[in-house]
Amino acid sequence: MPRPAPSGPWRAARGAVTAAYVAQGLGYAVVVTSLPALKARQQVDDMTVSLIVLGVALMAAGGSLVANAVAVRFGSRAALTLGLAIQAVALPAIAVPSPFGVFVAAWAVFGVGLGCVDASAAMQGVAVQRAYGRPVLGGFFAAATAAAIVGALLVSAVAASAFAAGVALACAAVVALAAAIIVARFSAREKPVDEALPPSERARLPRAGIWVFGLVVLAIFVADSAVSTWSTVYLQDGLLALAWVAPLGYAAYQAVVLVTRLVTDRLLTIVDRRTIVAVAAAVSAVGCALVALVPVPGVAVAGFALAGVSAGVLIPVTFGAAGELDEAHSDQVIARVNLFNYAGAILGAVVLGLLADAPGLGPAFLLPALALAAILFAVPRFRAVPKVVPADR
């Protein structure tokens, strides 16, 4: 018997969550592909960039906790609106030339917004997926990826301008503000929990599953953060690629992420989920190994592209699987799993930066290759077929 179509409010909620993912993807892509220009403007070295990225990851972890606290009391709609509004303030602050202390503070604020949106957008996405009764998370992440490609190409297009970073970051801020307004008006209204979970309730959360899927997320984001943060720098500074070529490594990565995310929801209905996870992890591990072992710009771009398979497939699949662990407390589960995102960001971005001098950025990409290969040990913990239970309409 055909499943009834979701009601109008749920279709509007799906559009609002899509807008949030677009804003998140565009803003993050513009920030990371502007790193060389921002680095030159502030006259800092790779070590300083690594420390800034570390701070952003730590603040983003705090932002994920903020999202959990706000969602518990006011619902994930409020958390998502807050995160987008924070980004809309932080992005212009990063763009404007300022003293180093102000520059670092703007990055810290951006980190809080980043983590808040990461967690609350996934909460909203899982709620919409339950309402639809079929996988839709891949589509949300695909929207973020398409926006990320636009962001990378925007930075590439204005690379010759003296105000390149400022223009791109200002555009991203406008999109974040627009998304915040859309989310506040149309996203899903979830019943908030009146108060934080007591210790007895926290004890009932599926801790083993949270750790398994959290470590998978960590491995994925080791690779994602390594490519996002260092692909442009490595191509431009390490392989001496031209300024307009350097952002294309990240663009190629995001192009593959986009294609795989567009087909993930469909694949989940016809292919065993464990097979999908195993293949995606193996292919991406090979891609990172190519970057590490073959220091040629064309090969590096191809390796970055292959690395995109893991982020494209495994992020929506893993968050979807985490949302199935405990449907009554899926927001709390997702917020906790999302924290591993930032541990991965620290390993992928900061550790690679620390290895920039010895053995160098290229060989350092063996770290994400090994992390992705380790996902194969977690494959049996994934449910073979996604469990999607419709929410009340």
Image (cartoon, rainbow, N blue to C red):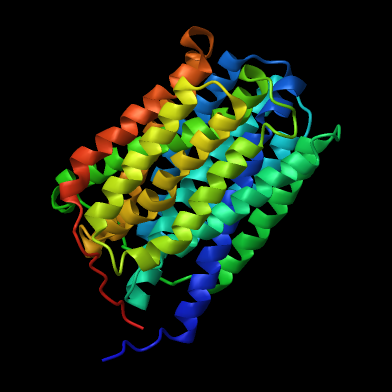
Residue at position x 59%, y 39% in the image? 250
**Left or right, residue 199 beside residue 329:** left
Which residue is outermost to the bottom? 1
Tell me what residue is drawn at x 48 percent, y 7 percent: 358
Image location (x, y in percent) of residue 205: 18, 52
**Residue for point 67% across, 15% down:** 44
Question: Residue sitting at 53 percent across and 9 percent down?
Answer: 357
Q: Quadrant of residue 192?
A: bottom left
Which of the two residues, 280 or 340, is positioned nearer the viewer here? 280
Location of residue 344 in the rendering, given as x and y in whole percent from the top left corner: 39, 33
Image quadrant holding the C terminus, namely: bottom left
Q: Nearer the viewer, residue 351 or 76?
A: 351
Vertical arrangement, residue 59 with respect to residue 153, above or below: above
Q: Nearer the viewer, residue 225 or 205?
A: 225
| Residue 391: x %, y % from top left | 31, 77
Name the spot of residue 345 as percent of width and height, x first. Answer: 44, 32
Name the quarter where the N terminus is drawn: bottom left
All told, the count of numbered labels is 0
**Observer able to see residue 148:** yes
Image position of 324 with respect to 285: above or below? below
Residue 21 showing in the rendered view = no
